[in-house]
């Protein structure tokens, strides 16, 4: 994607190219919104709100950062605003995350996994998602941006307007919190923890 061309065309009034931005970022934006809302319907609404903000504010984009970083900044701020507004409402989801809603990393060989293996993996992903959802916002945000959106420390630093060292510290603390919780799950026969980025 040629970011400069798309932004220039949008600023010139050619809003048909906005579809390219939506197509490129819709899964990441939805994934981030889902991690904050823990609800498919709420995440859809929040994603739409995020893209409306991007659409309205694209004229203020000045190439001081990458377009993706700017979009993530809007996404995170909108998600945090949503969380503040809805902090009194506790949303719990017991549905299993399907392949369309969440990226599922499987090593698929010629043979298909057995149904019980797929169910166990889905349950593990749901447990991890719920643990991430339960993290304090400052830790949840960096975990989502780094592990789920594959952003670099530098990009996260720019998007959140914090030093890279703070990003590193928050990631470390978030992983420790998750590791402690996942260890408890593992003791009950649940998930095995791996903190490495794939």
Image (cartoon, helix red, strand yellow):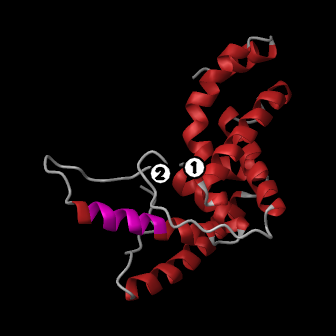
Determine if residue 123 is in view: yes
Q: Quadrant location of the C terminus?
A: bottom left
Determine if residue 154 is in view: no
Residue 115: x, y in percent?
Answer: 24, 60
Per the rendered image, the range of residues in magenta is: 117-126
Q: Is residue 32 magenta?
A: no
Quadrant of res 1: top right
Q: Residue placed at 25% from the left, 64% from the top? A: 117
* Residue pointed to by mark 1: 31
Q: Relative to residue 54, is residue 196 drawn left or right?
A: left
Residue 72: x, y in percent?
Answer: 69, 44
User: Which residue is at the front of the view, 142 or 126?
Assistant: 126
Quadrant of res 170: bottom right
Element assignment for label 1: helix
Q: Residue furthest left?
A: 111
* Local crowd size for mark 2, using a 10 Å CA cut-off: few (<14), some (14–19), many (≥20): some
The disc, 1 or 2, on the residue closer to the chain's N-terminal end is 1
> Where residue 68 is drawn, which disc sits there?
none
Element assignment for label 2: loop
Q: Residue placed at 19% from the left, 60% from the top? A: 114
Q: Are marks 1 and 2 in contact (CB under 8 Å)?
A: yes
Q: Residue placed at 77% from the left, 28% from the top? A: 55
Q: Relative to residue 101, is residue 156 drawn left or right?
A: right
Quadrant of res 186: bottom left
User: Which residue is at the front of the view, 10 or 98?
Assistant: 98
* Residue pointed to by mark 2: 102
Q: Is residue 87 above or below residue 47?
A: below
Identify the main secondary structure in magenta.
helix
Q: Relative to residue 67, is residue 194 drawn left or right?
A: left
Q: CA distance from mark 1 to mark 2?
A: 7 Å
């Amino acid at each position: 994607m040629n970011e400069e061309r798309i932004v220039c065309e949008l600023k010139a009034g050619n809003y048909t190219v906005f579809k390219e931005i939506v197509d490129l970022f819709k899964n990441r934006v939805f994934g981030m919104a889902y991690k904050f809302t823990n609800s498919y319907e709420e995440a859809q609404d929040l994603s739409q709100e995020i893209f409306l903000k991007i659409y309205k504010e694209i004229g203020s984009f000045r190439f001081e950062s990458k377009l993706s970083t700017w979009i993530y900044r809007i996404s995170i701020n909108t998600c945090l605003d949503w969380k503040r507004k809805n902090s009194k409402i506790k949303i719990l989801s017991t549905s299993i995350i399907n392949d369309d809603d969440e990226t599922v990393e499987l090593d698929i060989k010629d043979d298909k996994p057995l149904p019980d293996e797929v169910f166990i993996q889905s349950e593990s992903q749901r447990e991890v998602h719920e643990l991430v959802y339960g993290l304090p916002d400052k830790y949840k945000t960096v975990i989502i941006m780094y592990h789920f959106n594959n952003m670099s420390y530098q990009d996260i630093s720019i998007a959140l307007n914090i030093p890279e060292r703070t990003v590193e510290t928050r990631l470390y603390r978030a992983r420790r919190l998750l590791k402690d919780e996942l260890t408890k799950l593992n003791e009950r026969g649940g998930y095995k923890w791996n903190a490495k980025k794939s």
